Amino acid sequence: MQEKIIILDFGSQTTQLIARRLRELDTFCEILPYNKFPVGDPSVIGVILAGSPYSVYDPEAFKVDLGLFLGHIPVLGICYGAQFISHTLGGRVEPADSREYGRANLTTIDQQCPLFHGFEPNSQVWMSHGDTITALPDGFHVVASTANVHFAAYQADDKPVYGVQFHPEVAHSLQGTQLLKNFVVDICGGHQDWSPKNFVEATVQELREQIGQDRVILGLSGGVDSSVAAVLLNRAIGRQLTCIFVDHGMLRKNEFQNVMHDYECLGLNVIGVDASDKFFADLDGVTEPERKRKIIGRDFIEVFDAEARKITDARWLAQGTIYPDRIESLNITGKVIKSHHNVGGLPEEMNLRLCEPLKWLFKDEVRRVGRQLGMPEYLITRHPFPGPGLAVRILGAITREKVRILQEADDIFIQGLRDQGLYDQVWQAGAILLSEVRSVGVMGDERTYENPIALRAVTSSDAMTADWARLSYDFLARVSNDIINKVRGVNRVCYDISSKPPATIEWE
Ligand code: XMP
């Protein structure tokens, strides 16, 4: 049984960060909506009540029945979580004179409190709250203070219940990870046994039991998640797994051949399907971005479905869905919303059971598992690439010739990044063909009237927000020269310097 910490979500943006910090401590944890604590689950060794955009006094504030776990397992409240516990048990929470926001230092720390083992005097923490605790409930005492916040942290006298009004999950809380480790290891008795090695061993075992002698099909995209899922399944069930890799004709230059080769070297049983004629035919003349996406999505399902049906005895459909795709996050109205799911809407009547071996992993954990499985580094660190491929990087109607032009320009850019050791410093990079714009240039003695290429490179940690990468002028100049000299049809190169928001990473 995998021991775990439950993180109850009250709608704060930093809830996922708590989970990622715990995973970095090799501790398994699960984020659940505040009202879905798994009562009676013996694998739960502790619970964290996370932050919230609400004040405990808001009529809509999310409330949880503390009796479900208080006194049974260790509890840590963070920010709203700490205020909620204090308020519910009879303490006092009031609006702070001024919103307490930013860096602060713990001027007093109770060295007897296990939560603060190993803390330096004056340790820096990050505050972000509008309310503040002004009196603790009976049976609680203060264990840390800052200059402005007397009850920066508290503890119950006779049971493992703790609260901190600062955010240990945020990097500005310099010993925040130490605090979380103290809670998980010393207070909850966690074993830090959530490692890629253990994950692979346990998952291979589970997959064998789950799947038995059945056959499984999996759609490969060339991306990290589906590739790691395939290699993991291959280790578990070998030739019972059939992978399908659909070429829609809008992949990067030589990508289909290269990726097929990589998959074969990894020992995967892969069927490559060149369906580019169908995609180009159906996209003929289409310029509107959403229509492009819809057509590609629909065609992809049709092609995949037709291939999958040839494997008549398949019982399972495997997918590289990862944890952030599935977390039921709360929106401010308190409704549980499911974030987008990778399931491509495969026809229900296929009647296949879903197998998602990476469904508990964050992206960085998927990469660690890939390394554990011995996959080559360049596959593991490959940039994200949109499912519709270059179709959403050609502004205007799509033709094979435009795809060829864009593939050449993109290849020069990406190879340049690799050659200069810059590839791993950016989250994602690529070229965009502005095929409906033409501008005048001069090449030799000739006047040209051709399309521009935009280059896009961004830094990001999760693609939710992104900033344009500060690539050097010298590097951009070389790439621009190379593209204009070598790619016929392009006479101008621009660099996209917009961040997300308000722009997005892709142009369409
Ligand atoms: P945006 O453009 O929304 O992109 O800032 C965020 C991330 O998602 C990728 N992306 C897609 N991935 N199918 C995908 O599989 C899509 O339709 C799609 N659109 C955008 C994008 O490359 C970036 O990593």
Image: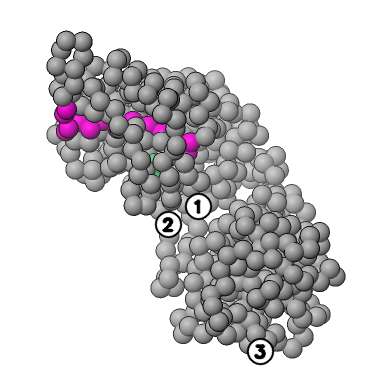
Bounds of the magenta span? 426-439
Q: Can you say whether 508 is above or below 171 in the image?
A: above
Residue 435 lies within the magenta run: yes
Would you place residue 481 above or below residue 59 in this image?
above
Q: Mark 2 points at which residue?
A: 339
Residue at (54% x, 61% y) in the render: 14
Mark 1 residue type = Pro
Disc with the residue nearer the chain's start (2 vs 3) = 3
Residue 137 is drawn in which quadrant?
bottom right
Task: Tell me the amino acid under the disc marked 3.
Answer: Gly
Element type at marker 1? helix
Query: Residue 227: x and y, percent?
Result: 51, 33
At a point 77% along the width and 81% down the height, the residue shown is 141
- Identify the residue at horizontal 43%, vertical 45% (top origin): 467
Q: Of 81 and 372, which appears nearest the observer?
A: 81
Q: Which mark is residue 90?
A: 3
